[in-house]
Image: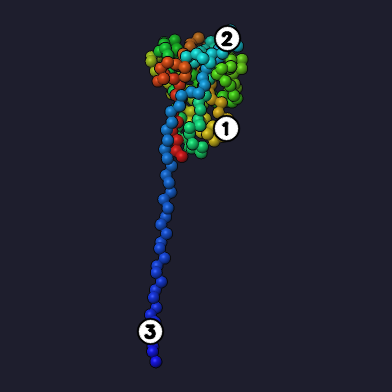
Amino acid sequence: VLTVAWSKVAPAPTPTPTATPTPMPADGVVSLTASEDTYVRGGGGSTSNFGSDVEIRVRSQGASSRRTLLKFDLTSIPTGASVSSAILKLCPVIDVGASEAGSVHEIYRATSAWSEATVTWNTQPPIAAQVTDLITLIQGPNCYAFSVGADVQSWLSGASNDGWLVKDSNEGGTPAEVRYASREAVDPLMRPQLVVTYTY
């Protein structure tokens, strides 16, 4: 009789699953030039359009005040991006003088569509009730930066991007005008610039 001895072989161990690393959000920075910008003028210029000017103006002068409108194309930023910061830079083409220093310029989100080729003081868009940011003018050759991250995030999340309006906080005060460079300015470094930092 042939006897066969069987030995019990332990099963091969099941490989321990290797955890798939979670991708870290990618950082991105995009620098944009205005896609549209202009200013509107009250008083005798209330029906005039200034969309092709090389300057955009903000002035305190009661019924004849000036206000600036700007819009930026955000389609180069990925849908679903989370905005870390967004800074809008404006540069005066003429140094701020003693009479303009101390003026406060406020930036508001526009809440309806407008076109730089047609908008006038009489047809300017309404604005949000709350100011987005403000800057105080300093005498000398300075550029100015508005923090607008919350507005940019809102637009990237689906709200209608109708840009911004910039105005003097006291339009009934002593006349004081600042002329910022527009997107038509000869020097590209002077043109309005929006720098958006985001994760995705």
Residue 139 in picture, x, y percent from top left:
40, 14
Residue 16 in picture, x, y percent from top left:
41, 61
Indicate the amino acid at tag 1: Ala
Q: Which residue does the image show at 45% across and 27% down from the upper left?
A: 32
Q: Tell me the residue that label 1 is attached to.
A: 159
Q: Does residue 171 appear anywhere in the picture?
A: no
Q: Which residue extends farthest bottom?
A: 1
Separation (CA) of disc 3 from disc 1: 78 Å
Q: Which residue does the image show at 38% across and 80% down from the upper left?
A: 7
Q: Which residue does the image show at 42% across and 12% down from the upper left?
A: 94
Indicate the amino acid at tag 2: Gly
Residue 64 in picture, x, y percent from top left:
56, 10
Q: Tell me the residue that label 3 is attached to.
A: 5
Q: Tell me the residue that label 2 is attached to.
A: 45
Mark closer to the chain start, 3 or 1:
3
Q: Residues within 10 Å of mark 2 (few under 14, many from 20)?
A: some
Mark 3–mark 1 CB contact (< 8 Å): no
Q: Which residue extends farthest top?
A: 44
Q: Does residue 159 appear anywhere in the picture?
A: yes
Q: Which residue extends farthest right?
A: 122
Mark 3–mark 2 CB contact (< 8 Å): no
